[in-house]
Each structure stands twice: as C-alpha cells, then as structure tokens.
Image (cartoon, rainbow, N blue to C red):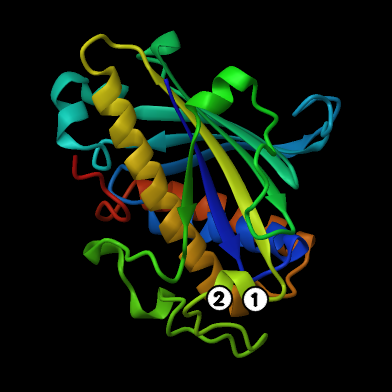
Amino acid sequence: MIIKEYRITMPISVDEYKIGQLYAVAEASRNETGGGDGVEILLNEPFENNPLMGNQFSAGQYTKKKYYMANKIGPLIRAFMPKSALLLEENAWNAYPYCRTILTNDYMKQDFTLTIESLHLADRGEQENVHRLSREDLAKREVVRIDIAADPPEASDYKSTEDPKTFESSRTGRGLLSGNWSRTCDPVMTCYKLVTCEFKWFGFQKRVEGIIHRYEKRLFSNFHRQLFCWIDRWYELTMDDIRQIEEDTRRELERQRASGQARGTSATD
C-alpha cells in the first residue's frame, strides 16, 4: 500500500474553492468523456448522519459515478485485464471542507481500492498531520507538493489558456503567477489530498500502485490549473447555479459517452 499526501496551494479562498471545485469537476467531466469512455453520473443527492473524519463532518452531497476507462488505462494494465474490467465505481461524500472519495472495481473486488480524502484549509500547506494519521501510517506517508504555476505539465496536457504563469483574471485581477507566489498571495488556501492505493495482485502491486499515483498527480495538477484559469467563468456563481450546471452536465455526458471520439487524459505507462 502506497500513501501519499498531495498539497496544492491555490490563490483563492476556501469559500471560493467550494464553488470553483464543483464547476471544474463538471467541466472536466465533459472534457474527459467521449467515444465510450468517460463519466456516468448515477446519483447526486444530499446526505446526512454519515460520520466522516472522526464525526467532525456528517452532512453534505453524495455522488455515485462510473468511470469508463478502456482508452485511459496504460498498456501494462490493459495487457492483463479484460476490457470489461476497465470500469471504476466512485462513491463520494462531499462534506466540504472535507471530502471522501472511494474508487473500486467490481472485477478486482477487495484486491483494489483507491481512497482520496481531501481537506481544504486557509493556509499555505504547512500543517503536518491534518488527516490525523496514526504513527504507523504517518511513517509511510510521502508528502508531494504541487505548484500549479512552476510544475511543467506533460506536453499533451498543455494549453496556453490554462497556464497560471500567463493567465490573469479580468474579474479578480489574480494571475500571472510567478516566483514565490504561493508564499505571498492573498487570498490563499491549500488542498490536502491524502491518497491511499491498494492493488493486491502479486507481482504487479508496486508497479501498478506507482502508475496510479503518477496518474493521480497528473490529474490533480491539470485539474487545479484549470480551476484557477477558469475563475472568470465560476466566480460569484451560486450553489443553485452549480446544481443546474451539474444536471445539464449529467445529460450531456450521456450523449457524449455514446458518440464521438475518446477525449481527455490517457495513461502512457
């Protein structure tokens, strides 16, 4: 089992991120869906009385999704898994500022679990153990910092309109991130994303878990660059606006998945 905590500092507030994240998830789902692959939204509804993070959070929005991954999984995994198995189920509880996401695969059952626990705090990413890990898990955890401006994306992921170094928001004046921006920007917040990956097939465990973590880092990097560079689209949207966008997206994804070409991020390992 590999445990990594990805820390992504953003030049927005915690309250702004709540809206921006939901907008960006909907938009990214559209961008990743087509030609049979992509996202199917099965449920999107409120939940309550579900204790999370030691009962610190217990109510929010629950979503259940399926991810069709035939063209997004790297050749190593495709070589020994049937195409019918390249389907992930996601159960997510968004009790913002805490979110818990669990991805499973019916073909692998208990042999595969990917858990992502996200905590969003108004700081610069310097807290040591926000997820309250045990001493044993803390010793296993690796902290990975993601800088949305300084870390170069893969060539196939780069878009000039989604580059925080050259983007400047017309609505907020934020942007042109450079140098030590994460130490000086105001407002500021950090996403602490704890990712625990278990892949229990003997002989493949370490390699596949490593591939999954590289893929997750790439997704986190791309997503947060986009979230910031799309700020003029989502800034000052209301939660009612977001729920309508999510419903429109659900209908659009059904159409896109059934037609067109595969789109979005594909693994190369």
Is label 2 in contact with label 1 (beta carbons under 8 Å)? yes
Q: Decide if residue 87 is on the left or right side of residue 92.
A: left
| Residue drawn where x is 29% and y is 11% of the image | 201
Q: Position of residue 250 (x, y in %)?
A: 55, 49
Viewer-proximal residue among 230 and 239: 230
The one of 26 and 149 positioned closer to us in this rendering: 149
Which percent across, then down, holds residue 212?
34, 35
- Tell me if mark 2 has few (under 14), some (14-19) or many (20+) residues whose alpha carbon lies within 10 angstroms of its own: some
Residue 154 seen in the figure = yes
In the rendered view, does 227 fall on the left or right side of 110? right
Residue at 52 percent across and 31 percent down: it is 90
The x, y position of residue 205, in whole percent, is 29, 18
Position of 25 relative to 134 (above/below): below
Say the numbered circle drawn on residue 185: 1
Mark 2 lies on a secondary structure that is: helix
259 and 206: which one is in front?
Answer: 206
Q: Residue at x 62, y 57 (%)?
A: 21
- Asked whether residue 30 is in view, the answer is no
Locate the N terminus and report the quarter of the image it occupies.
top left
Q: Position of residue 5 (x, y in %)?
A: 52, 40
Quickly name the residue at label 2.
181
* Residue 239 sits in quarter: bottom right
Element on which disc 1 rests: loop
The quarter of the image holding the C terminus is top left
Up/down of 224 relative to 84, above or below: below
CA distance separating discs 2 and 1: 6 Å
From what the image shows, is residue 242 above or below residue 213?
below
Which amino acid type corresponds to the residue marked 1 in the rendered image? Answer: Cys
Mark 1 crowd level (few <14, some 14–19, many ≥20, 10 Å Cα) = some
Amino acid identity at mark 2: Trp
